[in-house]
Image (cartoon, rainbow, N blue to C red):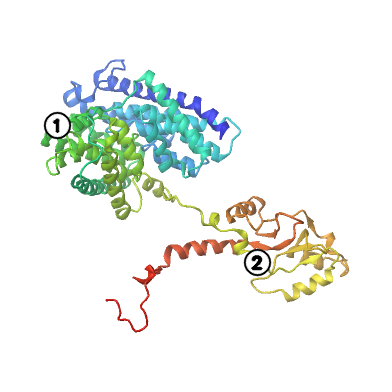
Amino acid sequence: MIALSLIAVPLGGVCALVAVALLKLIALFTNLFFFQRFATDALLPAQNALGWGAMAVPVVGGLLIGLMARFGSDRIRGHGIPEALEAILIRGSRIQPRVAVLKPLSSAISIGSGGPFGAEGPIIMTGGAVGSITAQLLHLTAAERKTLLVAGAAAGMAATFAVPLAAVLLAVELLLFELKPRSLVPVALSSAVATIVRRFLLGPGPLFSLAPHPALPSPTILLACVAAGLAAGTLAVAMTATVYAAEDAFQKLPLHWMWWPALGGVAIGVGGLLCPRALGVGYDQIESLLSGHMAVQAIVVLLLVKWAIWATALGSGTSGGVLAPLLMIGAGLGGLLNFVLPSTMGVGFWPLVTMAATLGGTMRAPLTAVVFAAELTGDFGMLLPLLVAAMTAHGLTVLAMRRSILTEKVARRGHHISREYSIDALELIFVEEVMRRAVTTFTAADTLAKAATVLATDGGAERQRLFPIIDDDGRLVGVVTRRALIGALASDGETAGRPLSTLMQPDPVVAFPDEPLRVVVHRMAARQLTTLPVVERAGPGRLLGKLTLRDALKARVRHLDEEESRERVLKPLAGLGWRRKRGAPAVP
């Protein structure tokens, strides 16, 4: 943990610089595509004066991305986080160095040419690539490479949005697949350093300015937050369905996938003519929605056009993130709910609530969504309504969808990802609870003749495969396997009087009765063993029994029983200790 933390600290600073460079690269391509000048000023695609010619810009961008993916690396396709998940779970946290170059470049071209995406997914993937490459240069395990990959990804997100805590929560909910100090501490340090570096490069944040809201809303408002969460969850389900419907439609085209981003660019160009504000990242539009400066008709047009071109372009396999579009569409839903739900909480309340709920429901990361929304606006008084709405949306999407928008893409590539964390059942049960105490043993002086007699009577499915060798005091001195005994008996020239000490394996791997099963099963896996003798930890090391993998499965059976067997532990009234006296009337 200390070594990884020492690496993660400078890594956070490097990834912050990479994030800033990517933002500048997006601005550069926006200037090149829409204004034909070499500059990094933060201009919006909607400000261009190209007229109908603006329709061709996303098509050109799509062509470039398709060529880069076809002849560079197809790993640049998509929105970044699923690709990071694949690298962690399938490829040992190894990301190719060229991906670290091509992913930010392709994303900058995509967004700079008007793509309705956010920079956060590509930055997460790029920061993860920097962390992975750093780890690959060092002598580390796959688990340690994963920690540095995720540390780079969290640093990139923290530097982009000035959200250090949300970046760590995103790592926990989506990328780490564990909650251990070994990984959590380095990731948190990397995120903190990236946020500090960001302060000097882009400012301290928050990204969106919003007047603070009351910290304790009324019960009526909280009930309305439940309704808003249900609406956001429904929107999340619909958005996910449209993205993969678009992807399925592109799969049916008689064209190589290299040309699909250009076709997605056609949809972006048409959408840009209908609503120019839907192009690009759209942070300015999120700011307008949160501040209440947008009319109903404008919200409807922006929401529908953004949704349509985002789903179509993302389904085409181009490069771009999903967080910013989810924030904008979610905030648009809140802008519409402003006219339906109570308006006593002030400007920006419902857009912020539905923004977090839509993000949490779509990505299945509700805690990240809550903290992310609070850090984006600096309005930490909103934590309670954000929590209610985000968890409601999350619960709805869990029931309505098998997978999230992120894990669905990985599943379509033939891999299953579980997003549920729980305590390992093997951690809760000790060896002494499941070990077998009746064990056939030998002494070192016993002969093959005696072993042959035991083997002849020890048959069936439960036949013993490992025989402990003990001394006169019952202490374990070695083991002999069933295979070794059978081989010795079958060898030419072997005598029945041969002592078992000549076949014995001294200093065997053992288990202790007070160890959790998880520790022992890991020991079995590391030594490629299926049976361990169990001995006393203290004292002379007397043999107590044996533990097999079949015995370890008893823990899984117990866990399954706890999950599926329902019972009424306490009966009404009787559970309170009330007993009816003999002859007394029954309590109605």
Q: Is residue 202 above or below residue 386?
A: above
Rendered image quadrant of residue 496: bottom right
Counting residues from the N terminus, which is met first, the one under dot 2 or under dot 1?
Answer: 1
Q: Nearer the viewer, residue 295 or 536?
A: 536
Give the alpha-carbon distance from disc 2 to disc 1, as whole Å.
72 Å
Rendered image quadrant of residue 510: bottom right
Q: Which mark identifies residue 118? A: none
Q: Is residue 518 above or below residue 377?
A: below
Q: Nearer the viewer, mark 2 or mark 1?
A: 2
Residue at screen point 33% across, 46% down: 251
Badge 2 is on which residue? 436
Residue lying farthest to the top in this orientation: 38
Q: Nearer the viewer, residue 576 or 76?
A: 576
Residue 316 in view in this figure: no
- The percent coordinates of residue 140 (x first, y second) are 59, 35
Badge 1 is on which residue? 294
Residue at screen point 45% across, 26% down: 193
Secondary structure found at label 1: loop
Residue at screen point 30% across, 41% down: 359
Q: Nearer the viewer, residue 99 or 337?
A: 337
Residue 11 in view in this figure: yes
The amino acid marked with disc number 1 is: Met
- The percent coordinates of residue 588 (x first, y second) are 27, 76
Residue at screen point 71% across, 68% down: 439
- Using residue 535 as the reference point, say whether residue 573 is left or right of it: left
- The percent coordinates of residue 170 (x first, y second) are 39, 38
Secondary structure found at label 2: loop
- The percent coordinates of residue 442 (x first, y second) are 79, 66
Q: Looking at the image, do the residues carrying marks 2 and 1 touch, with CB atoms under 8 Å apart?
A: no
The amino acid marked with disc number 2 is: Arg
